[in-house]
């Protein structure tokens, strides 16, 4: 009986093997959809045979990190680009010219070359090293570009199909995978099979503007599809969202595929390669506090200004230390708190004042929340601060991610007093057009003013945005403040008379 069972099992196994050969197991549904998308773009073979992409285009970027309002409208900068992608050797060369309200004419073209893991700038035949971050970003952008992303997805071991969603009122097939530890999502139009958008979820510990958001998304929408020479469909317009807000739009005006590659275009001199190789990437949280060759200065008794990429100030009061600004990131704020304790070892940090909604100003506010330190902030800035405080930081957990707690907000809607004695403070909303989301801080005993972002003296002696100066002067007049000196986020202490003089000069057109 056992022998008969064994013979039957062997026969069934043989028949099953023959069945599998004649009827292969259907491939993963996500792979099927990716191949359907390739077919819609012109076919997998044509995409694999694509050697180069060359285009020209025009576009614009939004300064979402430091515009007047976080909800927009945002400050706009325009660009025109020329780009060549060598898909065989993973090399990219792109030249950019910019134009915006401060640059009324097109700037000279600045070219970036990324080849063999090296990034360099070139302008007028002169080369300088670009950054390691640029090399990494270009590598990612190439792997997830319209011409490569489907091929990249097909190679992923964790390629999978998720639940359908609606985008632009159209059903989208959702495909996810991981590339270089970055979660990637492709949205395929269920009617056409063409990619509607590609989204990444990542943390960039090296970017000043976006590390504050922790695990942030970048979503690129593809539209204006065009049948190019050779039979490949390609999207001529790319619209990018970062952290859910419009970031940029780019339109291709001229396109060529499989153009011969000029090797000289990707040449980077050996000395530039050597200098590039000496670079290291520094995380925002690892930046040293302050600037070694520009030490902190006591601008009034118990008032210390610490210059840095973005400045911080310490104010000693009878019952503790007030810190002005929480810039850059959690790690930088942790260093600021420690520095305050070292300078004033007998005092605690009693409060922090964040005076603007610009990302660099509030980048480190999470650390103050994590330590339970009261946060003074303008009423209209509470929504963006709440968003920063609740943003997930799973890729690189900070103290607030590890130990969540509710922020201790002290919301400023009008004149607010903080502390007593010689270094008592008066905090005022500025409520001007450019300074709508800013606070100013007045030291009545010293006739000293802190002007947030509204005073920025440039190297040539002029001031950035004279409009800012008029607005801070109007706010001071409105509140009947007597100011002798002023300092700001990007400015050392200056005589108030210099601000008035600069406004007079601007009005006179001198």
Image: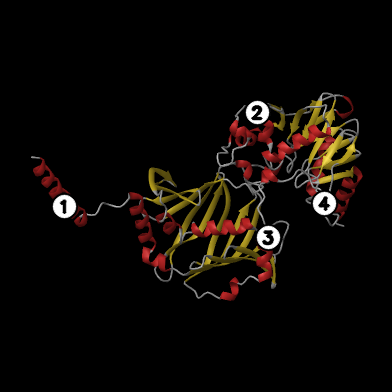
Question: Mark 2 Cα within 10 Å, few/some/many (few <14, many 20+)?
Answer: many
Q: Tag 4, which secondary structure? A: loop
C-beta proximity under 8 Å, tags 3 and 1: no
Q: Which residue is mark 1?
A: 14
Q: Residue at x 21, y 53 (%)?
A: 20
Nearer-N-terminus badge (4/3): 3
Label number found at residue 248? none
Nearer-N-terminus badge (3/2): 3
Q: CA distance from mark 3 to mark 2?
A: 41 Å
Label number found at residue 278? 3
- In the picture, measured across the screen, residue 496 lies left or right of residue 135, that is right
In this picture, is 499 found above or below 459? above
How far across and how far down the image is residue 223, in percent? 47, 56
Q: CA distance from mark 1 to mark 2?
A: 68 Å
Q: Nearer the viewer, residue 448 or 145?
A: 145
Residue 483 position by quadrant? top right
Tell me, yes or no, if residue 109 can be seen here: no
Q: Which residue is mark 4?
A: 463
- In the picture, measured across the screen, residue 199 lies left or right of residue 273, that is left
Q: Residue at x 13, y 49 (%)?
A: 11
Q: CA distance from mark 4 to mark 2?
A: 36 Å
How far across and how far down the image is residue 358, in percent? 69, 43
């Amino acid at each position: 009986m056992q022998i008969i069972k064994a013979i039957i099992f062997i026969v069934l196994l043989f028949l099953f093997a023959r069945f599998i050969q004649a009827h292969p197991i259907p491939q993963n549904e996500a792979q099927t959809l990716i191949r359907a998308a390739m077919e819609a773009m012109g076919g997998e073979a044509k995409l694999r045979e694509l050697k180069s992409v060359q285009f020209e285009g025009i576009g614009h970027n939004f300064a979402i990190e430091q515009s007047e309002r976080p909800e927009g409208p945002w400050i706009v900068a325009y660009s025109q680009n020329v780009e060549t992608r060598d898909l065989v050797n993973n090399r990219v060369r792109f030249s950019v010219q910019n134009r915006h309200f401060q640059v009324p004419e097109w700037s000279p073209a600045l070219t970036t070359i990324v080849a063999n893991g090296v990034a360099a700038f070139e302008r007028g035949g002169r080369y300088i090293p670009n950054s390691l971050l640029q090399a990494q970003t270009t590598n990612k952008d190439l792997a997830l570009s319209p011409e490569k992303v489907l091929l990249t997805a097909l190679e992923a071991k964790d390629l999978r199909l998720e639940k359908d969603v609606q985008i632009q009122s159209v059903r989208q097939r959702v495909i996810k995978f991981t590339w270089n530890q970055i979660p990637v999502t492709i949205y395929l139009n269920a009617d056409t099979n063409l990619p509607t958008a590609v989204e990444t979820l990542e943390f960039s510990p090296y970017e000043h503007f976006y590390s504050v958001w922790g695990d942030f998304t970048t979503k690129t929408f593809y539209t204006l599809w065009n049948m190019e020479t050779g039979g490949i469909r390609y999207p001529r317009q790319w619209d990018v969202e970062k952290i859910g807000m419009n970031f940029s739009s780019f339109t291709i005006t001229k396109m060529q595929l499989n153009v011969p590659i000029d090797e000289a275009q990707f040449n980077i001199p050996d000395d530039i390669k050597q200098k590039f190789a000496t670079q290291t990437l520094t995380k925002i949280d690892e930046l040293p506090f302050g600037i070694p060759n520009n030490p902190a200065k006591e601008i009034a008794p118990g008032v210390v200004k610490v210059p840095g990429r973005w400045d911080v100030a310490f104010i000693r009061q009878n019952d503790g230390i007030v810190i002005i600004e929480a810039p850059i990131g959690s790690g930088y704020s942790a260093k600021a708190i420690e520095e305050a304790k070292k300078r004033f070892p007998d005092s605690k940090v009693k409060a922090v004042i964040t005076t603007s909604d610009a990302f660099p100003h509030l980048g480190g506010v999470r650390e103050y929340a994590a330590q339970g330190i009261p946060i003074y902030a303008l009423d209209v800035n509470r929504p963006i601060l709440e968003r920063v405080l609740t943003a997930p930081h799973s890729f690189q957990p900070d103290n607030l991610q590890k130990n969540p707690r509710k922020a201790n907000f002290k919301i400023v809607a009008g004149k607010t007093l903080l502390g007593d004695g010689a270094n008592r403070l008066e905090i005022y909303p500025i409520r001007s057009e450019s300074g709508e989301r800013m606070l100013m801080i007045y030291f009545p005993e010293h006739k000293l003013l802190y002007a947030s972002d509204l005073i920025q003296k440039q190297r040539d002696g002029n001031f950035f945005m004279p409009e800012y100066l008029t607005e801070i002067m109007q706010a001071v007049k409105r509140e009947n403040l007597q100011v002798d000196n002023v300092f700001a986020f990007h400015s050392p202490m200056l005589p108030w008379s210099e601000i008035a003089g600069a406004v007079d000069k601007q009005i006179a057109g001198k």
